Image (tube, rainbow, N blue to C red):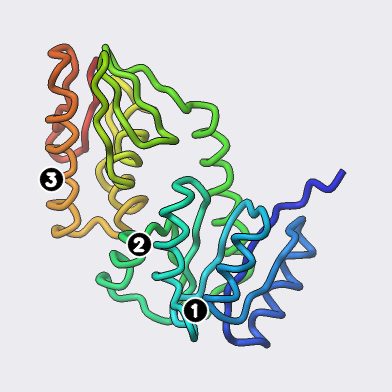
Amino acid sequence: MDNKIRLLLAEDEPSLGQIVKESLETRNFKVTHALNGEEAYEYYKNNEFDILVLDVMMPKKDGFTLAKEIRNENKNIPIIFLTAKSQTKDVIDGFNHGGNDYLKKPFSMEELIIRAYSLLDRVTVKNNFQNIVIGQYIFNYEKQKLIFNDENFLLTHRESELLFHLTQRKNEILDRSFILNKLWGDDDFFNARSMDVFISKLRKKLKKDQNIQIINIRGYGYKLMC
């Protein structure tokens, strides 16, 4: 039985793509290499993959556009962006388009492999917790929604990710810097303010159960109490 990790690599530089492909294939990956965004999307539609590695700047369809289209169909598959850009805005754009991680060129193969395995481990954990009980709510991670009696509250991708991490440390402190770096790519002031907004949105959606609180532990992070 073939238990290799199925990886789709979208990289328009043929030589770099071939090097990455060959290196990964020595480490238990089965790699399909696409030279542009349109070709990558065709491969994605016609095959099954465990993880995607997408160059941001590609002909025909860039990596952000490709990731956004894929996220409309699959909320869970891990996506790593490869890019020569590393400004905070570029990183934020990557996460806003559905990316899970961001790797700046030039990169080491060891770093790519470690990041890929880390994301795959997180997906395995999440797949074991499709329905999470939060007080009187049911949190369906796969469908990104909260259920309270007969009411459904749809969550955005980032709301769902943030709530998942809060539930995994229920009644414990979720470190502020950790979650900012995981979901926003940087723990700067502006991202911290953005996260505060998302926390407020989650509080409103969870307010029907008065025993649920998301407490701000100043200087440390947040705690989901229920």
Quadrant for residue 33, please give it. bottom right
Vertical placement of 51 versus 204: above or below?
below
Q: Is residue 112 left or right of residue 155?
A: right
Vertical placement of 95 versus 39: above or below?
above
**Front position in the image: 124 or 185:** 124
Q: Secondary structure at mark 2?
A: loop
The residue that label 3 is drawn on is 197
Q: Is residue 117 left or right of residue 145?
A: right
Q: Secondary structure at mark 3?
A: helix
Q: Secondary structure at mark 1?
A: loop
Residue kind at label 1, given as amino acid type: Lys
Q: Do the residues bearing badges 2 and 3 touch, measured as CB atoms within 8 Å?
A: no
- Marks 2 and 3, Cα distance to the nearest angstrom? 18 Å
Residue kind at label 3, given as amino acid type: Val
Q: Residue 97, labelled with which disc?
A: 2
Q: Crowding near pointer 2: few (<14 within 10 Å), some, many (20+)?
A: some
The residue that label 1 is drawn on is 105
Task: Mark 1 or mark 3: name the one nearer the start of the chain.
Answer: 1
Q: Name the residue located 24 percent from the left edge and 15 percent from the top edge.
A: 226
